[in-house]
Image (spheres, grey):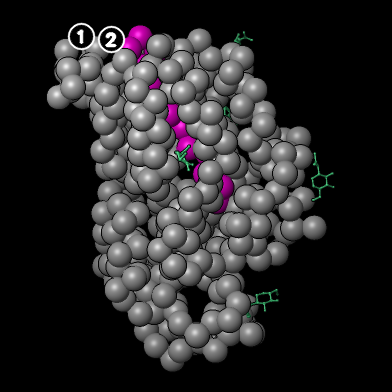
């Protein structure tokens, strides 16, 4: 049973917002003369978040105007902490040490679940490419550099792999996707690079900005491989892999996300008692044995004591807190 084992690279997307939302309501006005609420962050969740903003605005009831700059989760968090922006969208929670050092309370509100995956442009495969943390990690460290390397062939017996160089592509900006993927790769002892949002990559990798940078590179370059939110790859017809989980099974993100509540949230999954709790840093869908949306919905509607901004977002977009993958 592949579902009864470790989740892989699942993303819990969080809305980060200061408890007292006053700066922009007082200071900035949009063209429509409504108060401007400015946010930035995750590129992986940008398409979804923009759709949420557009839908919220389309109701015509919004007492403010929302903006969003997709600059990566790391920069989004920094800009919120420094008060340059009013909110952030992040596919990783705030680290507890950082959270505890903040000069005001930041609420972390989960609003979507998706999955990160290896995305590639190897053609001619009739089945998803299988990857392990060892093989994918070796590719990004350039210790495996050819598609017909025996280690790749061994786990892909049904693939005709080209005798060609691999073009690895990675994120150079401070990225939640990088943090998640390096966490996964570090489950194999061969991973010699750092784990985090922004790491020093080897020179042999192509280093680009944003999820779009990864997907555009792969769309243009044959035999390339990188990592991105799987829904973005799917809408752009970019192939995604099956990653090996802790039980040794190869799992595709669409299989993981199709799982039900019981399967997705495991018994080891502990939801913090409030959105203003540093414990969100410990919530990882990658290592939990399961996860789903229903508990999050309940959690948010009953226990958030949010600013008007959050109340509006949650009430005006019922899909907001749901499993959205693309
Ligand atoms: C926005 O509204 C459109 C049209 O009703 C809908 O298809 C889409 O799913 C909505 N997006 C979100 C994120 O709720
Ligand atoms: C990936 O592994 C599965 C399970 O071992 C296997 O059925 C499948 O054929 C493999 N895929 C390829 C492309 O070889
Ligand atoms: C979830 O799916 C599993 C099979 O994968 C099934 O046994 C279980 O009853 C389902 N649970 C719910 C709450 O639907
Ligand atoms: C919520 O959890 C925090 C940290 O574990 C704890 O200090 C606090 O008392 C808890 N609050 C409630 C209402 O249970
Ligand atoms: C997170 O988990 C670690 C290790 O289990 C624990 O030491 C730490 O207190 C937890 N942090 C929070 C904020 O719950």
Badge number at residue 22: 2
| Residue 263 horizontal/vertical position (percent) | 74, 44
Q: Residues within 10 Å of mark 2 (few under 14, many from 20)?
A: few
**Viewer-side residue, 126 vs 35:** 35
Depth check, front residue: 254 or 42: 254
Give the image location of residue 50, x and y in percent.
35, 39
Q: Which residue is mark 1?
A: 26
How many tags in the picture? 2
Cβ atoms under marks 2 and 1 closer than 8 Å: yes
Q: Residue at x 69, y 43 (%)?
A: 264
| In the rendered image, the vertical position of residue 145 relative to residue 271, given as above or below | below
Relative to the observer, which residue lies in front, 209 or 52? 52
Image location (x, y in percent) of residue 130: 59, 72
Give me the residue at 57% from left, 21% from top.
300
Check disc 2 and report its element: helix, strand or loop.
loop
Point out residue 149 in the picture as x, y percentages from the top left corner. Answer: 50, 85
In this rendering, position of residue 322 left or right of residue 174: right
Looking at the rendered structure, which numbered label has been put on residue 244?
none
Q: Which residues are magenta?
A: 9-22
View quadrant of ligand 3: top right
């Amino acid at each position: 049973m592949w579902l009864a084992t470790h989740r892989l690279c699942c993303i819990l997307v969080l809305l980060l917002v200061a408890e007292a939302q006053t700066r922009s309501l007082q200071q900035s006005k949009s063209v429509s003369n409504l108060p401007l609420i400015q946010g930035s962050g995750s590129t992986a969740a940008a398409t979804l978040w923009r759709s949420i903003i557009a839908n919220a605005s389309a109701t015509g009831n919004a007492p403010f105007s929302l903006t969003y700059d997709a600059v990566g989760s790391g920069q989004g968090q920094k800009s919120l902490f420094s008060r340059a922006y009013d909110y952030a969208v992040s596919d990783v929670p705030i680290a507890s040490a950082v959270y505890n050092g903040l000069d005001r309370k930041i609420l972390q509100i989960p609003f979507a679940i998706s999955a990160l995956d290896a995305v590639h442009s190897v053609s001619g495969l009739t089945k998803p490419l299988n990857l392990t943390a060892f093989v994918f990690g070796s590719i990004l460290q350039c210790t495996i550099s050819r598609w017909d390397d025996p280690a790749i062939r061994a786990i892909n017996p049904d693939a005709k792999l080209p005798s060609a160089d691999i073009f690895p592509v990675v994120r150079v900006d401070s990225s939640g996707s990088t943090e998640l993927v390096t966490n996964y790769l570090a489950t194999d002892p061969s991973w010699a690079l750092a784990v985090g949002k922004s790491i020093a990559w080897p020179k042999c990798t192509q280093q680009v900005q944003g999820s779009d940078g990864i997907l555009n590179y792969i769309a243009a370059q044959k035999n390339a491989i990188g990592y991105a939110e799987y829904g973005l790859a799917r809408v752009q017809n970019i192939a995604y892999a099956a990653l090996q989980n802790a039980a040794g099974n190869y799992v595709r993100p669409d299989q993981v996300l199709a799982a039900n509540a019981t399967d997705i949230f495991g018994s080891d999954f502990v939801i913090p008692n409030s959105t203003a709790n540093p414990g969100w840093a410990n919530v990882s869908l990658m290592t939990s044995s399961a996860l789903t949306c229903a508990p999050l919905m309940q959690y948010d509607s009953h226990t958030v004591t949010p600013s008007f901004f959050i109340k509006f977002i949650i009430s005006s977009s019922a899909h907001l807190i749901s499993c959205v993958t693309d």
